[in-house]
């Protein structure tokens, strides 16, 4: 699939990242950050205990739908990939997979976006 081709799920991947992985071999591994489509936390109810509400919001964010993670794991396994860590509070999951695996992840309804995992460096 050409970088300009916005097939199923390609809108979830930046043009630059899609273009970069086009040059990879089919068995090369790519590191990426997958953002899951997690449910909104909702607005806090001031009448409720704030601590309980905060813990409830954190629990919802830390525990995205099990089916979302199952689908993610199935797509990764199919393409020789794996999760590199757990799900963060923001619903992100670091992964390593092939370019075809990135496309498979992008096609999942439970995936909101996929970003290239890039090293962080200090500005000189």
Image (cartoon, rainbow, N blue to C red):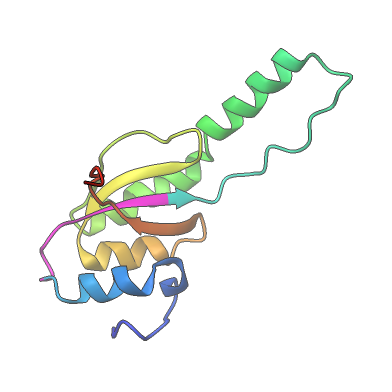
Q: Which residue is found at the position 57% from the left and 45% from the top?
A: 38
State the residue at coordinates (41%, 36%).
87
Specify the quadrant of the image occupied by residue 78: bottom left
Q: Is residue 94 left or right of residue 44?
A: left
Q: Position of residue 117 (x, y in %)?
A: 28, 51
Give left or right: position of 24 versus 89.
left
Residue toward you, 117 or 35: 117
Residue 101 percent across, percent down from the top left: 27, 62
Q: Which residues lie in the magenta part?
A: 25-34
Quarter location, residue 83: top left
- Whether residue 47 sits left or right of residue 107 in the image: it is right
Task: Report the residue at 10% width, 64% height from top.
Answer: 27
Magenta segment: does it hold 31?
A: yes
Res 57 quadrant in image: top right
Q: What is the x, y in percent for residue 30?
A: 20, 57
| Closest to the observer, 66 or 53 | 53
Point out the residue furthest to the right here: 47
Task: Out of 73 and 49, give the one closest to the viewer.
Answer: 49
Q: Is residue 60 left or right of residue 87?
A: right
Q: Position of residue 53 (x, y in %)?
A: 72, 21
- Asked if residue 93 is positioned above or below residue 14 in the image, the reply reads above
Of the 4 image quadrants, the one containing the N terminus is bottom left
Relative to 22, residue 90 above or below = above
Q: Residue furthest front?
A: 124
């Amino acid at each position: 699939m050409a970088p300009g081709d916005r097939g199923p799920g390609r809108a979830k991947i930046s043009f630059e990242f899609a273009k970069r992985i086009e040059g990879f071999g089919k068995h090369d591994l790519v590191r990426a950050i997958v953002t899951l489509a997690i449910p909104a936390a909702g607005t806090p109810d001031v009448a409720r205990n704030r601590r309980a509400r905060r813990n409830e919001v954190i629990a919802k964010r830390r525990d995205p739908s099990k089916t979302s993670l199952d689908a993610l794991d199935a797509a990764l396994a199919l393409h020789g990939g794996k999760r590199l860590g757990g799900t963060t509070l923001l619903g992100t999951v670091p992964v390593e997979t092939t370019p075809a695996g990135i496309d498979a992840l992008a096609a999942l309804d439970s995936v909101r976006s996929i970003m290239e995992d890039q090293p962080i460096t200090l500005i000189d």
